Image (cartoon, rainbow, N blue to C red):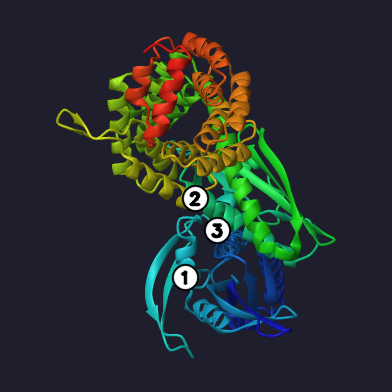
């Protein structure tokens, strides 16, 4: 902000001018004025349809400003397409054709809406460089819209600009009959969906306040959500420039899904009233229109940045568990013979849940291996394979072969992708739980440092992911950091309070309390986990140990009997050989409790 009457901001500027206007006026003044009025109507309609604002239409020129470069270029394409169509059959000498220039740069905006500055001057210079009936854009615009509009860009080299110390790179826009953004091509072939992960578009949130200042807050939330979702690498996320084409328009979610090539659409609204801000969000499966998730957030507008961060974190954290469940439901109906590697991995998720039977665990590992046959470099499937092996061992079904396979999966996944938070989380947890280093025939101990590094990097990249928080809780517990582990499990419960894996979070929190020496709290949570899913053996182990730490050995024996019914092969010696806990005293005491509770040696 410069002062109360001016502000400086980044904007996309469209400048247009009629080619040969004086010649046309001299030939037929009345017809030219009529054609100019018609053309002005086309400009105004197409500019406003793409959230632009006409600044001036003096003489035969047009000046407009847009929030996004894609809005400006798509408007220019639509104008030229419509003017060319309207003048079909006319000779070149009769046509009123416009040159259009588009630039993305700083402008100074006055309180009355007029704009000035180098950005406007450059747009006018680009207009002069365009062909009659054509469009010229700057390098900045080309970089912002490349691949996002239905047009071809032709590099026309560097051009000097009057009153600027440097030249600008100019790109001509060849219409090729496209005339508009993909949104204008509804009814044509749909954009294909990605096959390696769920695809998602975040539409501009609707400002329900009637206060234009709230537009910036709403747009800021959407930008933050897009950035955060892209960082998770769980989703194919459409860029802001493409989704903001829909700003201010009533949209059909199914049409958006077809045009952008996404399976899910996130939309929302912002309303300000009496010093409070209310934000709503809803996730919709585009093809069916089914609502996958919806929530509402409220806060004071005194600290809008803190509120924006909180809402962004809440929405991003909700996406993973809800999209995961929606994908599981969707893929159940897909014939196995037509599944891609990603879909095979999703099918395996059912076997990675606490309620999973041994058959489901076996099917999960088989699906993961089939996924890797389809795509041997699919690193996420390898990380999931590592966790599948961990869960088999934890459930009492696994053996040394599962340990070796799990380690191999984790090592390969990390070597291929050390920038994906889900892969880091799964692989880090697997290294902590399975991670013996083998040299010759000697076992040299667990790989705690590697597990910690992978976990901390995952937390840095995407702290709002459920998978990251859950795995961090497991790793911190193994490392003996009970309070830290508890914090991660509690965060997982907040992220997904109705998650199918909730009893795993609760049992993990119980173990974290035990590690921290809070045995009554551990017992309460272990009992809750057992009641929630009576067939999850890890909950029963937490129950046996918490009772043992409290000296309630008779009750621990009864709990151990039920645990052994679920995992009859579980013995004290197996526990001692596979227990991953770093603290030797904790391992010793837990082994003693198992012995006292009647677990076979």
- The percent position of residue 149, horizontal first and vertical second, equals 51, 56
Residue carrying label 1: 140
Residue carrying label 2: 230
Q: Earlier in the sequence, mark 1 or mark 3?
A: 1
Q: Determine the secondary structure under disc 1.
A: helix
Q: Earlier in the sequence, mark 2 or mark 3?
A: 2
Crowd class of label 1 (few under 14; some 14 to 19; many from 20; radius 10 Å): some
In the image, residue 402 sits, relative to residue 179, either above or below, namely above
Viewer-side residue, 400 vs 365: 400
- The percent position of residue 526, horizontal first and vertical second, equals 58, 25
Q: Determine the secondary structure under disc 2.
A: helix
In the image, residue 104 sits, relative to residue 438, either above or below, namely below
| Residue at figure coordinates x 70%, y 56% from the top left | 248
The quadrant of the image that shows the N terminus is bottom right
Crowd class of label 3 (few under 14; some 14 to 19; many from 20; radius 10 Å): some
- The percent position of residue 512, horizontal first and vertical second, equals 52, 35
Tell me, for residue 241, which label it has, or none: 3
- Mark 2 or mark 3: which is in front? 2
Viewer-side residue, 385 vs 372: 385
Q: Residue furthest right?
A: 274
| Residue at figure coordinates x 51%, y 73% from the top left | 132
* Residue 329 falls left or right of residue 297: left
Q: Determine the secondary structure under disc 3.
A: helix
- The percent position of residue 245, horizontal first and vertical second, equals 61, 56
């Amino acid at each position: 902000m410069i002062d109360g009457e001016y502000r400086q901001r980044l904007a996309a500027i469209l400048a247009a001018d009629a080619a040969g206007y004086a010649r046309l006026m001299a030939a037929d003044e009345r017809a030219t004025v009529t054609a100019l009025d018609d053309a002005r109507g086309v400009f105004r309609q197409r500019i406003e349809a793409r959230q632009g604002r006409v600044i001036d239409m003096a003489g035969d020129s047009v000046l407009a400003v847009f929030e996004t470069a894609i809005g400006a270029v798509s408007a220019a394409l639509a104008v030229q397409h419509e003017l060319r169509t309207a003048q079909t059959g006319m000779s070149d000498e009769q046509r009123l054709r416009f040159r259009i220039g588009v630039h993305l740069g700083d402008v100074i905006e006055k309180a009355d809406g007029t704009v000035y500055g180098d950005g406007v001057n450059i747009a006018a210079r680009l207009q002069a460089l365009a062909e009659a009936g054509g469009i010229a854009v700057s390098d900045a615009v080309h970089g912002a819209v490349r691949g996002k509009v239905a047009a071809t860009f032709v590099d026309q080299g560097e051009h000097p600009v009057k009153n600027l110390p440097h030249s600008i790179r100019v790109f001509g826009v060849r219409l090729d009959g496209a005339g508009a953004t993909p949104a204008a091509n509804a009814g044509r072939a749909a954009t294909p969906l990605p096959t390696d992960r769920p695809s998602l578009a975040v539409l501009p949130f609707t400002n329900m306040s009637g206060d234009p200042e709230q537009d910036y807050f709403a747009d800021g939330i959407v930008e933050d959500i897009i950035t955060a979702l892209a960082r998770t690498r769980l989703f194919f996320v459409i860029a802001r420039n493409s989704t903001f084409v829909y700003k201010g328009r009533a949209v059909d979610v199914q049409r958006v899904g077809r045009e952008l090539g996404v399976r899910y659409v996130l939309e929302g609204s912002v309303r300000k009233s009496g010093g409070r801000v209310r934000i709503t969000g809803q996730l919709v499966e585009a093809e069916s229109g089914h609502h996958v998730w919806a929530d509402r957030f409220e806060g004071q507008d005194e600290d809008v940045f803190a509120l924006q961060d909180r809402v962004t974190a809440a929405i991003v954290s909700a996406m993973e568990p809800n999209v995961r469940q929606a994908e599981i439901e969707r893929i159940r109906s897909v014939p196995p013979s037509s599944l891609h590697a990603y879909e095979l991995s999703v099918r395996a998720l059912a076997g990675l849940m606490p309620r999973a039977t041994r058959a489901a665990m076996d099917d999960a590992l088989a699906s993961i291996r089939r996924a890797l046959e389809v795509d041997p470099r699919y690193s996420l499937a390898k990380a999931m394979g590592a966790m599948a092996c961990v869960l088999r061992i934890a459930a009492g079904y696994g053996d040394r072969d599962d340990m070796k396979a799990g380690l191999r999966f984790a090592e390969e996944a990390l070597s291929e992708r050390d920038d994906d938070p889900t892969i880091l989380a799964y692989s880090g947890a697997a290294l902590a739980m399975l991670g013996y280093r083998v040299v010759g025939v000697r076992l040299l101990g667990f790989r705690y440092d590697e597990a910690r590094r992978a976990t901390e990097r995952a937390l840095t990249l995407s702290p709002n992911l459920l998978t990251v928080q859950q795995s961090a809780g497991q790793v911190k517990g193994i490392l003996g950091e009970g309070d830290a582990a508890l914090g991660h499990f509690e965060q997982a419960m907040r992220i997904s309070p109705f998650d199918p894996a909730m009893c795993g979070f609760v049992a993990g929190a119980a173990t974290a309390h035990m590690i921290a020496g809070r045995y009554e709290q551990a017992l309460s949570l272990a009992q809750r986990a057992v009641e929630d899913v009576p067939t999850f053996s890890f909950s029963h182990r937490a129950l046996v140990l918490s009772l043992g730490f409290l000296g309630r050995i008779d009750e621990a024996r009864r709990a151990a009997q039920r645990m052994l019914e679920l995992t009859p092969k579980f013995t004290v010696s197996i526990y001692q050989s596979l227990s991953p806990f770093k603290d030797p005293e904790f391992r010793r005491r837990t082994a003693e409790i198992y012995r006292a509770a009647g677990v076979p040696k």
